[in-house]
Amino acid sequence: MHLLAFRFFRRKILLAMTKLICVLIGGAFGTGCRYGLSLFVQNAFSGQGADGKTPFPYATFLINVTGSFVIGLLAELFSAKVPVSPVLRATLLTGVLGGYTTFSSFSLETLSLLRDGKWGSACVNAVGSVLLGLLAVWLGVRVAQML
């Protein structure tokens, strides 16, 4: 009996470790994608103010909206149409998209805009990110439902 219990817990531990490693690798990939897209967007919108800062955090805004769309799309597909393993689900939703999306960066950049007295940009960033993020998640779910 003890051998069966040992094998059962060993299997659960191996599955948990596999999931953790996959989430870590996915997070690294998502973070790399975020960094690469940030560089691209910063170069595309390189206009800086007199203080050397960009007037609006375009990269973070774009990443939050696209990440919201993709997480809505995948979450709906995985729950309704394309069953995937718990490991793959965690890898993509928690790892890749967790590394890709930038809510903490969004919060810090919004605070920086407020501290710099750019209240209009801060409000557009905060309200726009939340509203467009919600819209993007809903759109992702709708697209998944149509597939």
Image: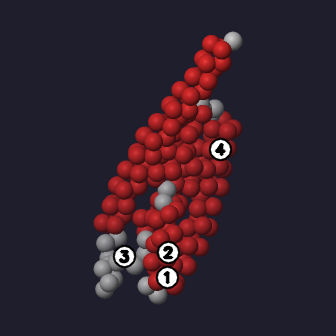
Indicate which disc, 2 or 3, sits on the residue closer to the N terminus.
Answer: 3
Q: Are marks 2 and 1 in contact (CB under 8 Å)?
A: yes
> Dot 4: within a 10 Å radius of its alpha carbon, few (fewer than 14), some, or many (20 or more) residues?
many
Three-letter residue code for mark 4: Glu
Residue 35: image x %, image y %?
A: 36, 56
Badge nearest the viewer, 4 or 1 = 1
Count of all numbered marks drawn on residues in the image? 4
Q: Are marks 1 and 3 in contact (CB under 8 Å)?
A: no
- Which residue occupies 49% across, 82% down? 114
Three-letter residue code for mark 1: Leu
Q: Do the residues labelled 2 and 3 touch (CB within 8 Å)?
A: no
Q: How far apart are marks 2 and 1 (CA)?
A: 6 Å
Indicate which disc, 3 or 4, sits on the residue closer to the N terminus.
Answer: 3
Q: Residue 114 has which mark? A: 1
Badge nearest the viewer, 1 or 3 = 1
Q: What element carries label 4?
A: helix
Q: Name the residue under label 4.
A: 76
Indicate which disc, 1 or 3, sits on the residue closer to the N terminus.
Answer: 3
- Which residue occupies 61% across, 24% down? 9
Q: How far apart are marks 1 and 3 (CA)?
A: 14 Å
Q: Mark 2 points at which residue?
A: 110
Badge nearest the viewer, 2 or 3 = 2
Residue 54: image x %, image y %?
A: 36, 76
Q: Is residue 25 above or below residue 68?
A: above
- Which residue occupies 51% across, 49% down? 97
Q: Residue 15 has which mark? A: none
Three-letter residue code for mark 3: Thr
